[in-house]
Image (cartoon, rainbow, N blue to C red):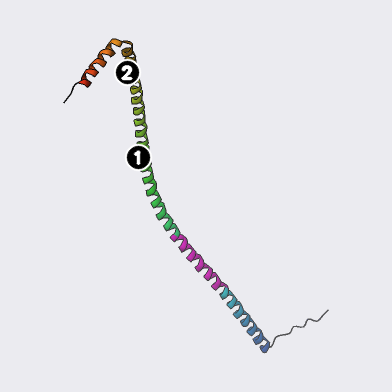
Amino acid sequence: MKKVVINFATKKDINKLSEKITFMNKDMTQAFMNVLEAIGKLIDRIDASNKRIDKAFVRMDKYDKKMDKYDKKFDENDKKFNEMLKKIDDQGRRIDEQGKRIDEQGKRQDGVLEILKSNRIILDNHDHRIKKLEGQNLN
């Protein structure tokens, strides 16, 4: 059998060990405090970032409201523009119809002129009257 020797620490040894533990505790406490301080700074940065983000969202909401107003105005102006285009198209159709009627009248007048040219007597009488009027003093 082996002998087991148990050494009891003296009071001086215990005090040294206690100082070391306290010193270690101070270092650990300081390190922990440094970590907490760093975490606090990070939290402050995150809070500041969140405030900037909140302000950005407020600006975006204002911008969205302005854009909604502009969208409404654009829609109104687009409707007015479409109505104007429709009126222009209607006027164009009317002008085309008038042009067709004028063409038809011109064809009729050409037909009448052909008839007049074929009837020399009517033209001669007409020319005779014009010559008579030219010779007179109309004053």
Q: Quadrant of the N terminus?
A: bottom right
The magenta segment: 35-55
Q: Secondary structure at mark 2?
A: helix
Badge 2 vs badge 1, beta-carbon distance below 8 Å: no
Left or right, residue 63 beside residue 124: right
Kind of residue at disc 1: Lys
> Residue 103 at what x, y percent from top left?
35, 22
Q: Residue at x 23, y 16 (%)?
A: 129
Q: Give the answer, above or below, for where 118 lies relative to 97.
A: above
What residue occupies the far bottom of the structure in this picture? Answer: 12
Q: Quadrant of the C terminus?
A: top left
> Residue 2 at what x, y percent from top left?
82, 80
Q: Which residue is disc 1 drawn over?
A: 80
> In front here: 77 or 43?
77
Q: Nearer the viewer, mark 2 or mark 1?
A: 2
Q: What secondary structure is the stretch in magenta mostly built from?
A: helix
Crowding at dot 1, Cα within 10 Å, few <14 / some 14-19 / many 20+, comes out as: few
Left or right, residue 132 beside residue 115: left
Crowding at dot 2, Cα within 10 Å, few <14 / some 14-19 / many 20+, comes out as: few
Q: Residue at x 21, y 18 (%)?
A: 132
Kind of residue at disc 2: Gln
**Residue 60: which disc?**
none
- Asked if residue 79 is among those painted magenta in the image, a careful observer would answer no
Q: Which residue is disc 2 drawn over?
A: 109
> Residue 29 at what x, y percent from top left?
58, 77
What residue occupies the far right of the structure in this picture? Answer: 1
Q: Secondary structure at mark 1?
A: helix
> In front here: 28 or 86?
86
